[in-house]
Image: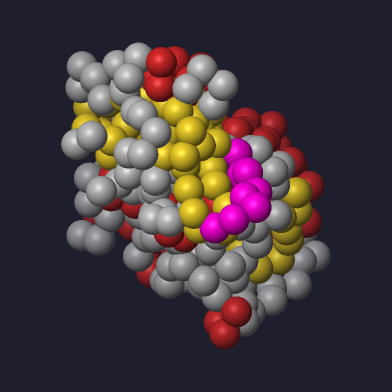
């Protein structure tokens, strides 16, 4: 039976990326509860921190649920007891089992930060930048039991800036996600949206980021290195080694060379004017770096402090 009153909804989401979508849902529905990941240690001091959506839910006066298990049947029973019309899922961090997906009357709608079926998975923003995409966006879909495989019904697109980092793009896509919720969720609830199956043959995967993904491959070419640095910023951070010590690279730019330089990773220039690293037919000028155990600094300051010198081979 169709609920003739105000829309009742659950919200599943954890990081700050999800908060604009939570705000958008709160503006149009009675949010019965926010479901997010448990509090966990974060930062250098490893102090226990609450998810961003939990903090926002408290500001909005919405109850918070932080289950540790979803597949025992107890959580699905709780979700069914809420008698909600819809659940909105945004960067929750877990795949919902079938009994949870079926608990809301209209199922679960997801805001995913890519143009599906491209970049299914946990880190679509970072991998889109790393792989040199010039456009991305958010896609709304009805969740099924797969990893971002459900039928889609709306998308909003945006260009990726040539110098934009994953952190900067995430902030923009978070706001775009909120806009998509405002624009399309009411249409979905009215039954006015067509659910379009994804083309699995065009799918690509955006796996969960690990620290090792940050390692720079200087032989991959200057444009790839630049995009890798952008895509790994702010986490896990692009890094290489110099004289046996780790150094993070926060920003770099492509420089064309008249003659190919080998080996890849060789420091061609390291002085007060610039730090230039060979990548084959091109080079990368390092802009800002963070040597192990030190603050972020201009690459030229790193060179002037003899942290790197001409002829060094980075990543060796």
Out of 248 and 155, give the one closest to the viewer: 248
- Does the magenta segment cover residue 225? no
Residue at point 55%, 75% (across, down): 203
Which one is in front, 109 or 16? 16
**Residue 103 quadrant:** bottom left
Q: Relative to 98, is 255 above or below?
A: above
Give the overall secondary structure of the magenta segment: strand
Residue 103 in view of the camera:
no
**Residue 275: x percent and y percent?**
49, 30
On the question of residue 309 being in view, the answer is: yes
Quadrant hosting residue 232: top left
Horizontal relation, residue 54 to residue 120: left or right: left
Q: Is residue 191 above or below residue 113?
A: below
Q: Nearer the viewer, residue 65 or 130?
A: 130
What residue sits 36% from the left and 39% below the top? Answer: 311
> Which range of residues does the magenta coloring cover?
253-260
């Amino acid at each position: 039976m169709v609920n003739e009153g105000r829309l009742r909804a659950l919200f599943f989401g954890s990081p700050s990326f999800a908060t604009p979508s939570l705000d958008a849902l709160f503006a149009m529905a009675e949010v019965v509860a926010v479901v997010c990941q448990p509090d966990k240690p974060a930062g250098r001091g490893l102090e226990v921190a609450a998810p961003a959506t939990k903090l926002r839910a408290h500001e909005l006066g919405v109850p918070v649920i932080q289950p540790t298990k979803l597949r025992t049947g107890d959580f699905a029973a709780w979700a069914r007891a809420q008698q909600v019309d819809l659940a909105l899922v945004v960067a929750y961090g877990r795949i919902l089992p079938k009994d949870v997906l079926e608990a809301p009357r209209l199922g679960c709608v997801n805001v995913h930060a890519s143009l599906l079926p491209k970049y299914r998975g946990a880190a679509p923003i970072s991998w889109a930048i790393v792989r040199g995409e010039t456009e991305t966006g958010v896609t709304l879909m009805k969740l099924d039991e797969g990893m971002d495989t459900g039928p889609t019904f709306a998308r909003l697109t945006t260009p990726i800036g040539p110098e934009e980092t994953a952190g900067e793009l995430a902030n923009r896509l978070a706001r775009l996600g909120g806009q998509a919720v405002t624009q399309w969720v009411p249409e979905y609830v009215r039954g006015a949206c067509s659910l379009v199956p994804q083309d699995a043959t065009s799918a690509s995967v955006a796996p969960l980021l690990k620290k090792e993904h940050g390692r720079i491959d200087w032989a991959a070419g200057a444009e790839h290195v630049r995009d890798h640095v952008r895509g790994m910023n702010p986490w896990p951070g692009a890094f290489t080694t110099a004289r046996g010590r780790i150094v993070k690279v926060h920003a770099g730019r492509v420089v064309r060379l008249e003659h190919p330089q080998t080996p890849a990773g060789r420091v061609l220039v390291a002085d007060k004017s610039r730090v230039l690293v060979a990548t084959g037919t091109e080079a990368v000028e390092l802009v800002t770096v963070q040597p192990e155990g030190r603050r972020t600094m201009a690459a030229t300051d790193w060179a002037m402090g003899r942290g790197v010198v001409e002829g060094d081979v980075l990543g060796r």
